[in-house]
Amino acid sequence: MLMKYQQILEEIHKEVVPLLGDGKVADYIPELAKVDPGKFGIYLLFLNEEAYYIGDAHEKFSIQSISKVFMLALTVAHLGEKVYERVNVEPSGDPFNSLVQLEYECGIPRNPFINSGALVITDLMISHLNNPKEELLSFIRELVGQEDICYNETIAASEKACGFKNAAMVNLMKSFGNIKNDVEEVLDLYFDFCSIEMNCNELARAFRVFANHGKGVIDAKRYITESQFKRMTAIMQTCGFYDEAGEFAFRVGLPGKSGVGGGIAAILPGEYSIVVWSPGLNPKGNSLAGMKALELFTTKTGTSIF
Ligand code: GLN
């Protein structure tokens, strides 16, 4: 067993190395453009503690939109079903930063895993949590079981300086009454959330709680209810990869979430979490080699939710 998974990760590593130059590192956030596109890491973590990794699996990177999963989990844990009155649960079929549907859907975002949806979640967090910036970090630290998970203020500032589309989105939603707080406050906090840095190992530990239906594997604490877990996983499956969610389900077959930092975190509920990092993105903003690596993994191991 031990050899089997390690060998598979090694095979995958070899197969994706030629792809590492093909993707394009996100450069609309100037700080992210500095990341080495040759980086590649995978961390695979089973509920029973078996773990396998390869490459740069212990190097921190900007988790970007993967933080949207933590934001949603914390917010539903506090507010329950009410969250879904302000954000829908349909795949958008549009890029993650699109404004198009907001206009004719009266400022209600398609789902919580595109930028507009996460901005509404941020607004809810400001309204209902005492100190959302601290609380999100504490929540993630608790899921991981480690204290040194932090925001990167340089990346947050870099995104804020160029975040015109997110600003447009917040203002449009505010005009429809779906943003209750000050738009600058919402944007600042959203950029902070995107700037969190973690490595594949830390993300795999956090997502293992989701693979375990919302219950900590080590502390046995229930972080989200079984029903909240079901809903969140369904949204990961249908909306976790923007306008490539269908393609990801088709090729990989696991619920998950990507970010423009090049990370992808995915789970096989009841079995494992797996995180891959490779900063070169495909045209839809998902890690090019990361998606290929996960496709190879589920194919070689014969594991997927289908
Ligand atoms: N911070 C990024 C943005 O708002 C997050 C996008 C992403 O990771 N897909 O554009």
Image (cartoon, helix red, strand yellow):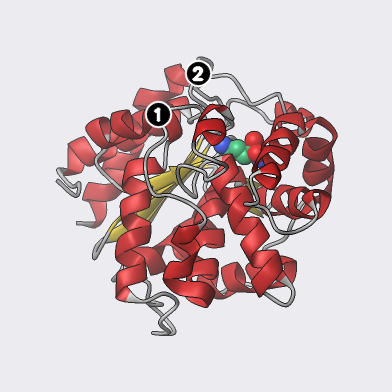
* Image coords of residue 216 (percent x, y): 41, 77
175 horizontally vs 244: left or right: right
**Mark 2 in CB contact with mark 1 (< 8 angstroms):** no
Gap in Å between the C-alphas at discs 2 and 1? 14 Å
Residue 158 vs 142, above or below: the answer is above
Q: Is residue 297 visible from the viewing direction of this image?
A: yes
Mark 2 or 1, nearer chain start: 1
Q: Nearer the viewer, residue 238 or 108?
A: 108
Q: Secondary structure at mark 1?
A: loop
Where is residue 208, by image quadrant? Answer: bottom left
**Quarter of image, ligand 1:** top right
Residue designated by label 1: 93
Where is residue 189, by image quadrant? Answer: bottom right
Q: Which mark is residue 210?
A: none
Q: Residue at x 27, y 39 (%)?
A: 297
On-image quarter of the C terminus: top left
122 horizontally vs 230: left or right: right
On-image quarter of the N terminus: bottom left
Residue 284 vs 124, above or below: the answer is above
72 horizontally vs 150: left or right: left
- Please, what is the three-letter code of the amino acid marked with disc 2? Pro
- Please, what is the three-letter code of the amino acid marked with disc 1? Gly
**Dot 1, crowdedness within 10 Å: few (<14), some or many (≥20)?**
some
Q: Which mark is residue 283?
A: 2
Q: Residue at x 42, y 34 (%)?
A: 92
138 horizontally vs 189: left or right: left
* Image coords of residue 273 (percent x, y): 36, 57
Q: Which residue occupies the extreme bottom position in the image?
A: 220
